[in-house]
Amino acid sequence: MSSAIDLHGDPHVERYLETNGEDGYHWRNGTTILILFTKGRKSGEQRTHALIFREHEGDYLVVASKGGTDAPPAWFLNLTADPNVEVQIKGDRFPAKARLATPQEKPALWAKMTEVWPDYDEYQKKTTREIPVVVLERQ
């Protein structure tokens, strides 16, 4: 059974991919991690990101918080430019389409995400930018 591992950034992505999530799927405070593959909007190169997620009705939720900074994370800008992404959860890698949670969906989806990572509420207080919830729909 895999144990929680406190990796960050590229080392997290690399270890996750090397072990099909055996190391890196379980993260801090009971959270789980997926790997998001986007295409760089300027470079066209594949980019990888380890993100906290939750499953919701067959889709996967992630939050574009960047710790509450005023600028959104690069991965969010990339999927805004091209919503066709890939997702890896443990050893399962699949194509997905990213979309923003609608204004009607967002309150419930935000609450679902803050159940596992309450800091998202603090991040929102730090910025005037509305932090989006992104829905990743398996294709």
Image (tube, rainbow, N blue to C red):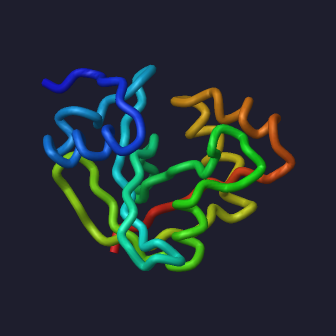
Q: Nearer the viewer, residue 56 or 36?
A: 36
Which residue is at a point 82% across and 43% down the rendered structure image? 127
**Is residue 10 placed above or below 133 in the rendered structure?**
above
**Is residue 29 placed above or below 39 in the rendered structure?**
above
Percent of width and height locating residue 35? 34, 52
Q: Is residue 6 left or right of residue 83?
A: left
Which residue is at a point 74% across and 30% down the rendered structure image? 122
**Is residue 71 placed above or below 80 in the rendered structure?**
above
Q: Residue 97 is drawn in which quadrant? A: bottom left
Which residue is at a point 78% across and 53% down the rendered structure image? 130
Q: Residue 137 is drawn in which quadrant? A: bottom left
Percent of width and height locating residue 52? 45, 41
Percent of width and height locating residue 45? 38, 73
Q: Is residue 84 left or right of residue 20?
A: right
* Image quadrant in which the N terminus is located: top left
Q: Residue furthest front?
A: 43
Q: Is residue 13 left or right of residue 73?
A: left
Q: Nearer the viewer, residue 92 or 115?
A: 92
Percent of width and height locating residue 47? 39, 63
